[in-house]
Image (cartoon, rainbow, N blue to C red):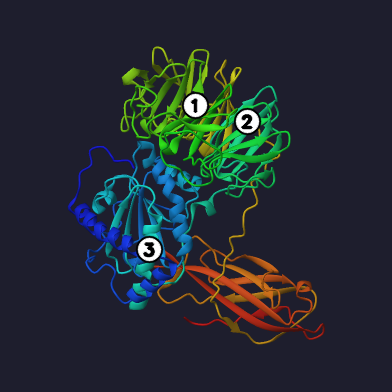
Amino acid sequence: MLFPKGRTLSVLSLTVAALCVVFVALAFQAGAQPNKAGRETAKAKDAGKDPFPNAKMDAPELEGGVGWLNTSGPITMESLKGKVVLLDFWTYCCINCIHILPDLDKLEKKYPNELVVIGVHSAKFDNEKESNNIREAIMRYQIEHPVVNDANMAIWRRFGVRAWPTRILIDPEGHVIGMLSGEGNYELLDEVINKLIAYHDQKGTLDRSPVHFNLEETRAASTPLRFPGKVLPDPEGNRLFIADSSHHRLVIADLKTGKVLDVIGDGKPELKDGGYSEARFNDPQGMALKGDKLYVADRKNHALREVDLKSKKVITLSGNGKRGRVRRSLGKGPEVELASPWDLLLIGDELYIAMAGTHQIWMMNLDSGSIGPFAGTGGENITDGTLRSSEFAQPSGLATDGTWLYVADSEVSAIRKIHLKKDLVDTVIGEGLFEFGDVDGTGSKARLQHALGVDFKDGKLYVADTYNNKIKTIDPKSTESLTYLGDGKPGDSDAPARFNEPGGLSIVGDKAYVADTNNHAIRVIDLGTKKVSTFPLTGLEPPASADQLAFPSDAKPVSSPAAVLKPEGTLTIDGTVAVPAGQKLSPFVPLRYRVRTKGHQGDALVKGSGETGSAAFGIEVPLAKLAGAKDLLVDVVYYSCGDGSEGLCRVGGESWSVPVSFDAANGTTTIKLPSETK
């Protein structure tokens, strides 16, 4: 949990904190039931009682943000009436904020029609205040709920928030229920949301109509790489290993030509061992190579994976998919829980791990299999000293000169160093959690901004200064830090050299390979000439995506007059959806349709989209596909929004059932579907 510098409490924060006591007490009582049956009995018994009789403070409006993302427009508290609302105050650099995203996703999937999650992005770093950068983070983390850019912390102050991450729960009548800060608490939130749904369902104040948000991901171009986090060149094997992080896979390419040699993982996020086409990762990051074994920091799976490049098999060395806590002892095997391992560095048989989630450096002995903390107490800070007393803050990159282990310590915008033979931790550049910027200089005068990558070459450290969109060099002896490439502006040009949140950097020979994360590319720097080029990947396609076409299951088919059709040619189906009064079709997302035949409901003969903003649609179906059919089923799904609340759209659907027969002489090739007024 991260506390912002110099923030003060408001009256509202004290009120919400008081409500939180009731919130936690109620959830504790609910969780104290002896078994599942007991909990269900208690829920049924208490359904008629207001679980929060003292929570009568209206939630403030979500005003003061500088823009809305992952949706079509602003969302008001009034438009959310009828829904349980969970506000998530976060900042995209924060590992604790990242850790709770799976919990939010789980709640959204469990209560798709009752719960709306709104992300309130109240930035820590200057770079995080830009809407375009937040947009990239939303897609990188695969967030599927609306986010308001609270760049000036206006909403943060209005709700009295004190730390990242913080969640605030609001009931369907717009009353603030309570506040929770820090990681975890999924079970607590689940219990309380369950109680709110039961009570407001009985009271008649719960709105279960489906909602739709215009997600950033649906508007983004498909790319072969998706937010690559780290890169590892192998000159001896003439290979380049790429962590294709948001595609949840690894890519192996020819180091000279860029031709793709292999892809490891099928692109679906999961912890699964097996062959290259069966294995699965979840946001893989740093890698290390020893012989025919590739070691992978499987970040969201909280696991350390091993890829046998000869047998083409993937196994899990440590971690079981569950996020671990701070650990102070050694262990072995998958039962040892990790927390967001971000980078790896191999020195002999010792594999060093940047354990971002516990703010520690870990080490695994590949010979014995033992794994555990090497440096850091688990506290989030910039504290030098001994291995046991030192503190780090989300370490994300590792490098060595043979004597020191260098650490890109991202949350303190620092480069730290650990002596490999002595009990000593020191700082090269960096002053604290809230001391960041873009300043060349020496020692305490220099500033970085959330640097994620580091490597060593010829007496210098090369740093991916991520949020400054630069590559910098640092002399570890004099502590002089200088801009090497990039002008600070995000971009994807080779000349002038521009980057967009570079996350990984690895050097071999006279070339530095950069994982240019937000550009979905690998960049190559010639260290002799300082010329930049983009690595020419060939033969790589994005993973197959799941069909997102979803139709309301409760749409009752409208009976249509029977149609006699010709057996050949093309059938044209015309129709118009009836948009509810006071609503208009989303100006961003067109209606979608599918055509099926009875008895084959799962197989769409034709599917597609209409014109954006139009309630009318036309569908063409090859009549040969209807041979032998007796009933034609047409389904349409659309999204309608109220005037002034375009950010929150409702999902609507209509279905038609048309009895059909065929006659070559008297048949038609057109069907006009009847429409209903709503």
Q: Which mark is residue 132?
A: none
Q: Which of marks 1 and 3 is nearer the N terminus?
A: 3
Q: Name the residue under label 2.
A: 535
Q: Is mark 2 on a helix, strand or loop?
A: loop
Q: Residue 228: percent from the left, percent from the top?
A: 56, 38
Is disc 2 surrounded by few (<14), some (14 to 19) or many (20+) residues within 10 Å? Answer: some
Q: Residue 586: percent from the left, percent from the top?
A: 47, 64
Which one is nearer the viewer's eye here, 416 or 628? Answer: 416
Q: Name the residue under label 3.
A: 191
Q: Is mark 1 on a helix, strand or loop?
A: strand
- The N terminus: image quadrant: top left
Q: Residue 514: percent from the left, percent from the top?
A: 55, 29
Q: What residue is shown at x 43% (from left), y 55% (from top)?
A: 104
Label 2 and label 3: CA atoms lie apart by 50 Å
Q: What residue is shown at x 52% (from left), y 13% (from top)?
A: 458
Q: Is residue 168 placed above or below 360 in the rendered structure?
A: below
- Asked if residue 278 lies left or right of residue 183, the reply is right
Mark 1 vs mark 3: in front: 3
**Mark 1: which amino acid?**
Leu
